[in-house]
Image (spheres, rainbow, N blue to C red):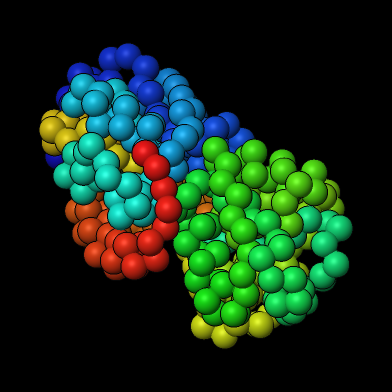
Amino acid sequence: MAWPLAARAETYPTRPVVMMVPFPAGGATDILARVLGERLGSILGQPIVVENVGGAAGTIAVGRAVRAPADGYMLSIGTSTTHMLTGGLYDLSFSLLTDLDPVIMIGSEPLLVVAKKDLPVNDLKGLIAWLKANPDKASVGIAGVGATGHLTGIAFQKATGTTFQFVPYRGNAPARQALAAGQIDFMIEPSSNFPASVQAGSVKALAITSPERVDTYPDVPTVNEAALPGFQALLWYGLWVRHGTPGAVIETLNAAMRKTLADPDVVKSLSVLGVYITPASQQSPEDLRAFQKAEAERWWPIIKAANIPHQQ
């Protein structure tokens, strides 16, 4: 049983593999890619070279992956934003559902509501009250138009009856820097972006969008606890290759990623980041394909109805 997989591993990979990250260095997806890439490379026997290409909510990088040779030497790591939501936001020249083949669903994480340290609020209830008293005055950093944080922000506006301005950046890292510098008022973005900033006191964590509190932020209440019962939001991560990549290569990658996600050091690193690893029973390529399709069917009509302005 082990011989066919071993034989395939001898023929793939025979050179370094690129992992295309659709955001600038320093953001949640970039950190995740580097944690995974180090262990994955050791399992595959070839280095994983992380390449960052930001812009257009990740569609530039995904487009490169779609145009790459179908040989498994370019991996497309991404999120629910880059590999699902943008399909409803942009008129893409490719299909997220058919031009990429899934490898594995990596995991998910909640979003964190964080404010600049000088904002005159100390909790989510205070933020909502301040927003209502200052309609359209607050600025909210997002990692791109139509990204998870943007859509969650729209849902937050509707749930709270507030209005504020969205400021798009080329990823979470530059938005986080702007928040720490006091150039924007708050963010609702993946929680793995902020442990160091919260610990340093450069930003204030107000609430987390998971059903329960998380180990990374044990003192931060859930949005449900703080002010908005039933309000939840998660960002999920996956790995893809170009459509047409040989099935044997995808099997090799999936097997190597399963080992990577089971590695104790990786489990610990992802736990610190606040990323919940997908259960082993749901780590097949078919599981990711079905989940991605179901998410698109859920979110694309919502995006269309929101009439979010964009340009490609």
In the foreground, 226 or 85: 85
In the foreground, 141 or 233: 141
Asked if 71 appears above or below 160 in the picture, the reply is above
Give the residue furthest to the top. 15
Quadrant containing the N terminus is: top left
The answer to whether residue 220 of the structure is visible from this angle is no
Name the residue: 21% across, 43% down. 95
In the image: residue 21, left or right of residue 183: left
Name the residue: 57% across, 31% down. 25
In the image: residue 112, left or right of residue 181: left
In the foreground, 216 or 83: 83
Residue 120: percent from the left, percent from the top?
A: 85, 67
Name the residue: 62% across, 59% down. 165
In the image: residue 69, left or right of residue 122: left
In the foreground, 3 or 187: 187
Q: Residue 287 lies in what quarter of the image? A: bottom left
Residue 144: percent from the left, percent from the top?
A: 50, 46
Q: Residue 132 lies in what quarter of the image? A: bottom right
Residue 235: percent from the left, percent from the top?
A: 47, 57
Quadrant containing the C terminus is: top left
Give the residue furthest to the bottom. 229
Asked if 298 appears above or below 201 in the picture, the reply is below
Asked if 91 appears above or below 302 in the picture, the reply is above
The answer to whether residue 10 of the structure is visible from this angle is yes
Residue 119: percent from the left, percent from the top?
A: 82, 62
For the image shown, how many numbered marks are present on the structure?
A: 0
